[in-house]
Amino acid sequence: MRKILLSEGTDLTELLGVRKYDPQAEFERKEAERLAAIDKNRMHKFLKRYAWYRKLVFKPARTQFPSFIHKTDEDRIQLFPDYFEKWGHLKFTITEKVDGQSATYFCVPNPKKGLFRKKWLFGVCSRNFQLLKPDKSSYWTIAKELDLENKMKTWCDKNRIGLIIQGEAVGVGIQGNKYNKEGMELFVFNVTEYTHGKSRNYNQMEQTLFCWEQGLKAVWVLNNNALLKPIIPEMVGLAMGISNEANIPREGIVVRNYDNHVSFKVVNPDFLLKYGE
């Protein structure tokens, strides 16, 4: 058998042919294709303008992800070969990346005014869709268990501004429950104020304080004042280690500079090897 010598930190995903098994992502990909096909139907387009059709015939359980919210996928560091030349002078926050499902919750001002209309609109989203009806999914289960609708509306009333919370859902029924949770938990990694089409992201200190005040869990902060390593294998070395949530390799790290809106992820090869993802 021919031996292949690799340097430490080499990305093994292509070499080993490993792929992350994410049934939720696969379902949402197919659902997006299905909804796109429906939207192209001329009769559907014509009838959708009538309220009776939308209420009685076309009752979607989900719709497209809200356009005013930024999706949470982070690109891998390998997509930025010149990262050090561009950002080597900046300070970054490094947090642990946990293996779960991306979840988004929002509470924004209702654009429709009226005596009997809701002041705030609360919404629950998966990675790619807004989930219009409460169900038994992890997204709605977490919203109910954490009482997010009431918490967010109370906060919005007090501060007179909209709010978006994004995090990683982990636990029973999610990605094999690698962290051996008894229920479901949400690790918040983005908190955003939103009003009149404008948004402001909280930095890590603001997020941590917000989560503490609201009884939520923030992602684990590994370094709040980090400099980038000059080569990718050294950055991969930073991603390696044991998770703060269980005695398993952590999935990786997320590296952010809030002032310059720079962020990317670094995956732990030990995690990929252990779980074949």
Image: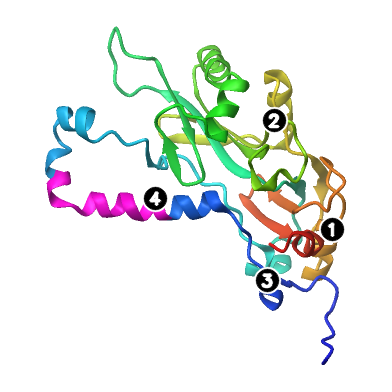
Q: CA distance from mark 4 to mark 3?
A: 36 Å
Question: Where 65 sits versus 237, above or below?
Answer: above
Evaluate whether residue 231 shows in this view.
no
List the residue tagged with mark 3. Answer: 82
Under circle 1, the secondary element is loop
The secondary structure making up most of the magenta span is helix
Please give the residue where the numbered disc 2 appears in the rendered image.
Answer: 183
Which image quadrant is residue 62 in?
top left
The percent position of residue 91, horizontal first and vertical second, equals 77, 51
Q: Assign the N terminus to one quadrant of the image.
A: bottom right
Residue 183: x and y in percent read 70, 30
For the residues carrying marks 4 and 3, which lies nearer the camera in this image? 4
Contact (CB < 8 A) between labels 4 and 3?
no
Q: Mark 3 or mark 1: name the one nearer the start of the chain.
A: 3
The residue pinned by badge 4 equals 31
Q: Earlier along the polypeptide chain: callout 4 or callout 3?
A: 4
Q: Quadrant of the C terminus?
A: bottom right
Mark pair 3, 2: CA separation: 42 Å
For mark 1, what is the residue? Answer: 240
